[in-house]
Image (spheres, grey):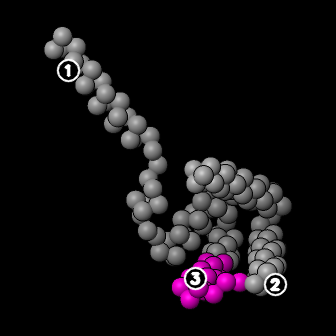
Amino acid sequence: MKKLFIAALLFVGVASFAQDADQKPTRQQREKLTPEQRNEKHLQKLTTDLNLDTSQQAQVKQLLAERSAKADKLREERKDRKDSNVKLTAAEKEAFKKQMVAEKDANDAKMKAVLNTDQYKKWTSMQEENKDKTREKMKEYQKDKE
């Protein structure tokens, strides 16, 4: 009986460790990367996925830096508004959405100018996959929130 009890405890302990290993690190546990490190990591991924040559790498690096700077600026503005409890009006929200669509279209046009047709097709499909993954994560988040 004593051996059975010890075996059961051992099994439960091993099972609980196995579950911990499967989970992804939470947002706080992940390492914090600087904007330059994030851009470099993204550039390396794009280089391997799209087979970018050196001139394309330089152009894409510049585009990523510009986009990152704009995103940081918008993030700071949003944080400032949140800290001051200033809510956007419906017209301001609509203008912001239009601005974001215009930024995305401009970024797509710049990427299209840098990449060849096959690379651009692959890049757009990667964008769609990322968008789908984001939607799934948002659905999970909403479900967990309820």
Q: Is residue 92 visible?
A: yes
First along the sequence among labels 1 and 2: 1
State yes or no: discs 1 and 2 in contact (Cβ < 8 Å): no
**Residue found at x 77% / y 67%:** 115
Q: Which mark is residue 82?
A: 3
Q: Main secondary structure of the magenta part?
A: helix
The residue where tag 1 is placed is 6
Residue depicted at 61% across the width and 82% down the height: 78
Cα distance in 3D space between marks 1 and 2: 66 Å
Q: Position of residue 38 (x, y in %)?
A: 53, 69
Q: Please name which of the two marks, 3 or 1, marks the residue nearer to the observer.
A: 3
Tell me the kind of residue under disc 2: Ala
Q: Are marks 2 and 3 in contact (CB under 8 Å)?
A: no
The magenta stretch spans residue 72: yes
Describe the element under mark 1 as helix, strand or loop.
helix
Q: Nearer the viewer's eye, disc 1 or disc 2?
A: 2
Badge 2 crowding class, 10 Å Cα cut-off, few under 14, some 14 to 19, many 20 or more, is few
From mark 2 to mark 3, how far is it between C-alphas? Answer: 18 Å
Point out the stretch of residues depicted in magenta: 67-88
